[in-house]
Image (spheres, helix red, strand yellow):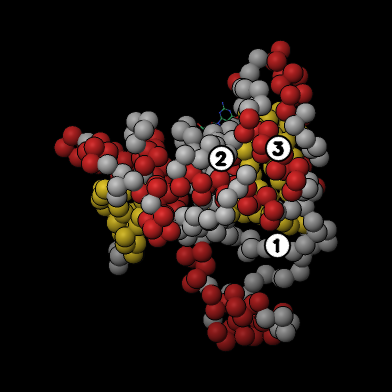
Amino acid sequence: MTTPDMEQQHETSDTMADKPTLDPQQEQLLADFLGYEPRESEQVPEGYRSGFVAVVGRTNVGKSTFINTALRQKVSIVSPKPQTTRRRIRAIVTRPDAQIVFVDTPGIHKPVTKLSEFMLEEAYDSLSDVDVILFMVEATTPPREQDRELAERIRAAGKPTILVINKADQIDISIAKERAEQYLALGEFQEWFLTSVLDPENVDKILDAIVAHLPPGPPLYPAEQVTDITERELAAELVREAALHILREEVPHSIEVQIEEFRERPNGVIYIAATIFVERDSQKKIVIGRGGEMLKRIGSLARQEIEAALGTRVYLELWVKVRKKWRQDEAWLNRWGYKVKRKKRR
Ligand SMILES: Nc1nc2c(ncn2[C@@H]2O[C@H](COP(=O)(O)OP(=O)(O)OP(=O)(O)O)[C@@H](O)[C@H]2O)c(=O)[nH]1
């Protein structure tokens, strides 16, 4: 996978290649002189399309699953527990005819902590900055209040919108028509699908529909880049995902993971030291487990996932610390990058 960490190594070549004054021959000469690989032709095929797509929907409807399937690799963490995604993550799908930059957003939910206020802002803010909106709902339930509120905000944003009624594999065929009608009544949609994003073929059909609504334009990111989160951020997310999978109900939402150290050792192994923050002493005990057994399981699962994502061997060291009520503490939230806005939303 290529992430911005890797991109930095190529900074010189990218900066040079961006200069519009060089023709391909001059570019090659400069590349030979400086010893870098020039980019392939900057020519954009006729009719190429590109743009930003917000993937929005209630929590747990399958947004991250959709994005990971679209990319055929994991950039956004998935778990059966609601409110897994906390920040906006850009995920980039590059095809011969188009580049789609997905903005995976936190699921829509009732804000109960300052952290959840931040998450809601992130989701709503994304609507105004994109070219296409992908509104995801789940076929297993009729529309809920949060679906309606989101539909209203989508209408106000006035962008082409594709409705994906997901988890169709979980409903009886006899209610499919009624369920589709219930969701279609929520707004004006350019396209809609009753589908399951667990199947890559279904995801590809949705991608085709998105591309048809993107504006013409050149790629916005290099073709090999799949996300805008750094390897360090991804490692933190994967430790949090492992904890979400392994721990019981109430602890996971209190977890924040910060990477303290991330460096490559001379033998090629990446050494990562991470701290798992929780809100209470009792949670710290749970995360560590009897004789450290729970922490060992979290570490082992996270290490495997990080190794798969980075394609290298990883040595992962985990620590657990308590930051009392951090989800309500603006100082900690800001320090960890969850900038809580003061403005009130209706
Ligand atoms: N049966 C079935 N399960 C699905 C489908 N799509 C997603 N899931 C499951 O639904 C759960 C939630 O999926 P996520 O992709 O994490 O949902 P999300 O909308 O990103 O959730 P938040 O990050 O909380 O907003 C996971 O257990 C997925 O495996 C589907 O089409 N069918």
Task: Find the residue positioned furthest to the right.
Answer: 46
Q: Is residue 270 left or right of residue 229?
A: left
- Is 73 situated left or right of 254 in this image? right
Vertical placement of residue 23 versus 7, above or below: below
The residue pinned by badge 1 equals 219
Query: Mark 3 vs mark 1: which is more N-terminal?
Result: 3
Q: Nearer the viewer, residue 172 or 87?
A: 87
Residue 113 screen position, x and y as percent: 44, 43
Residue 138 to residue 154: above or below: above
Q: Residue at x 64, y 51 (%)?
A: 126
Check the image and report above or below for 146 versus 99. above
- SS at mark 1 in the image: loop
Q: CA distance from mark 3 to mark 1?
A: 29 Å
Q: Dividing the picture into quarters, in which one does residue 336 lie?
A: bottom left
Camera-side residue of 117 and 169: 117
Residue name at image x 68 percent, y 56 percent: 129
Q: Would you say the beta carbon of the disc 2 residue lies within 8 angstroms of ligand 1?
A: yes
x and y, in percent, of residue 243 in the image: 36, 40
Q: Amino acid at mark 1?
A: Pro
